Amino acid sequence: MTQTTAGSDRIEVASSRFWALLHFNLTRLLLPARMVADHVGISTNIVGFWLTPWIRKDEHLPLSHIAEVGHTRGFFWDSISVESSGGLNPLVVEGLPKSQARYFVAHVRERINETPVTPQPPRR
């Protein structure tokens, strides 16, 4: 997990290479999946196949569109899923070290709660 020094603006978590080794996932062993949270939103960077690292899946979800941050706790490793308010295609990263996943989820939930909610006018 990395964090910048400029006001703790960005936090990053990556899947464990040891998890990838135990699951015989060569792609995650060479190119771990990453999830990054900053003041704008949450982004993922996932390479699908180790032989074609230039083909990767980069997704971004703004903070205003985040509905839920799910934290699935395993015995050794955790996974994080970030669901949008639309409900389609959650951002998911598996095989995360427990302490890093816990810190990442707490940090993102804190940022979501800080976001001011604008009240909607009553419907007629």
Image (tube, rainbow, N blue to C red):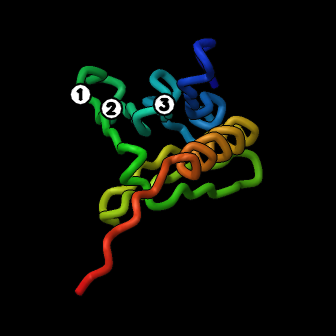
User: Label 3 near label 2: C-beta < 8 Å?
Assistant: no
Dot 3: within a 10 Å radius of its alpha carbon, few (fewer than 14), some, or many (20 or more) residues?
Answer: some
Instruction: Please name the residue that numbered disc 3 is placed on.
Output: 38
> Mark 1 = which residue?
55
Answer above or below: position of 124 versus 76. below
Q: In which quarter of the image is the N terminus?
A: top right
Which numbered disc flags the more N-terminal residue, 3 or 1?
A: 3
Badge 1: residue crowd in 10 Å (few <14, some 14–19, many ≥20) = few
Marks 1,2: beta carbons within 8 A:
yes
C-alpha gap between disc 3 and disc 1: 24 Å
Residue type, numbered disc 3: Asp
Q: From the top left corner, tell me how far across and down residue 56 is, in percent.
A: 28, 30
Residue found at x 70% / y 39%: 103
Quadrant (top left/top right/bottom left/bottom right) for the C terminus: bottom left
Residue lying furthest top in this view?
5
Q: Is mark 1 on a helix, strand or loop?
A: loop
Residue type beneath disc 2? Phe
Depth order, front residue of 59/122: 122
In the drawing, does residue 53 fall left or right of residue 36? Answer: left
| Residue 119 horizontal side relative to residue 38, left or right | left
